[in-house]
Image (tube, coloured by chain):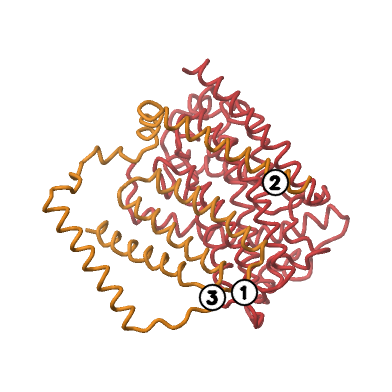
Amino acid sequence: MLAESLFVMLGTLSVIGALGMLIARNPVSSALWLILTLFCVAGLYLTLSAEFIAVVQVLVYAGAIMVLFLFVIMLLNLGTMPTMKGVGWKKAVGFVLCVVVLTQLVLIGATGLDLLPATEVVDVANAGSATTIAKSLFTRYALAFEVIGILLLVATIGAVMLAKRRFA
Amino acid sequence: MDVPLWLLAIIAFGVINFMLISASVLVYAERKVSAYMQNRPGPNRVGPAGFLQPFADVFKLMFKEDVAPRAASPFVHSLAPVIMVVIAMTVPAMIPFARGVVIVDNSVTVLIILALTSVSVYGVTMAGWSSNSKFSLLGGLRSSAQMISYELSMGLAVASVVLLAGSLSVVEIVEDQSVGGAVLGWNVFRNPLGALIFVITAFAETNRAPFDLPEAEQELVGGYHTEYSGMKFGMFFLAEYVNWFVASFVIVTLFFGGYLLPFEPQILAAYPGLEGSVGLGLLQALCLLVKVGFFVFLFLWVRWTLPRFKYNQLMEIGWKVMLPAALVNVLLIAIAVAVFMG
């Protein structure tokens, strides 16, 4: 029960954060809203008792990537973007209604055609532990893991090459 | 081990107050030790031997007017010091003070400590940005660059410890160091390079000299907290000193046996009645504090002995010395674990 109410709270907050990121006119505020969303997503992982993924989410996304984002934004010293023209409340209400109706239609269609994925109950106690993840990462998904490693290496080398050509 | 919730609450309350009081004691220690190192008496007017000086400072900060720049972004400007203090106060929850006395104990506590360290950059960055001042912004930028550069080496040093212990839980890492009897199981003896790297990166992460570029007075006024006054500045001050104290705790816990007594197996063999008693717990807490005391003094010692690095030196040490050394260390430890423990 607690987990459910937490889920609703964190989910709402993360959506608010995402909307804030889109609406904010200042790049730094946008980044701060995005950080809020990332923390809420980490909290969502916690409600699924995936402690390892939750902490890694904070460590990698909030702790490393967003710090670099913020760093670059501050270094570039971007000005604020022009404020949006006022969106009439009629358009806003219409948009929300459209989203709700579309979601319902998709859900009904999916259930009618039996397309929803079956809820799979895994070993909840150990589903999120580092050992479980490492096991599947280094056995079943070993090839994909290695390919991603090479991809990142290529991207790193590419970035270094680009930076060198610019300033050499 | 199942500790009842009320006992945990009492421990947590005690730990928070301990950290708050420790900050004022550390301020006094810093001023007194630095004074003796520079052959002057230091604070000696308020209270016996000047011992009440930090309390006088705190009262001064609390009653000072809080001035915020008009161009500052008000919410973020107030949020930044709060983030710093909250994060500094959260890390002690993961540190075991004696066997079984720890507030948070799950399977990923080491990662939580690392995550909190990396998130604390936001406090500095936000303070630098929201003040809308050149000096603050430069201080914030320097600080985030420095913390990102040294976080990598710190994470790799921690990874080598995790490899040795085979667990991501701080409690299990401490208990793992009790192998080998006496003191030889401590990670500093099994993993000396990792310990050295971790201590140096801890200096960099806490922004202490010789890594105190973010608040270099000669060039940046006060760095990221130039535009803060009153208790908001006090919170940055508090966070800095608590961070210093907590960093010492983490160093001791990960590399110097944490709460383990030196020669614990022998002592337990000599006094079997001690096993599992409250007395042993007190001894362990005392032992932890003595070890932490040494590192607190080391931080002071280094600060008042070494000059500050230049920015290019800072980056060169971080990327060209610490990172390769940490990578090689992790590789060596991994090979050693596979060969000797596998």
The chain that appears red in the image is B
Q: Nearer the viewer, mark 3 or mark 1?
A: 3
Rounded to the nearest whole Å, what is the CA distance between mark 3 and mark 2?
37 Å
Which residue is more in the foreground, B286 or B189? B189
In the image, what residue type sits under mark 1?
Answer: Met
**Pointers 2 and 1 in contact (C-beta within 8 Å):** no
Which residue is more in the foreground, B123 or A72? A72
Question: In what element is the residue under mark 2?
Answer: helix
Q: Residues within 10 Å of mark 2 (few under 14, many from 20)?
A: few
Q: Which residue is at a point 37% across and 84% down the rendered structure image?
A: A88
Which residue is more in the foreground, B284 or A96? A96
Identify the residue under disc 3. Answer: B75
The chain that appears orange in the image is A
Q: Do the dots labelled 3 and 2 sit on one chain? A: no
Identify the residue under disc 1. Answer: B231
Q: x and y percent of residue B215 in the render?
A: 74, 61
Image disc number at residue A163:
2
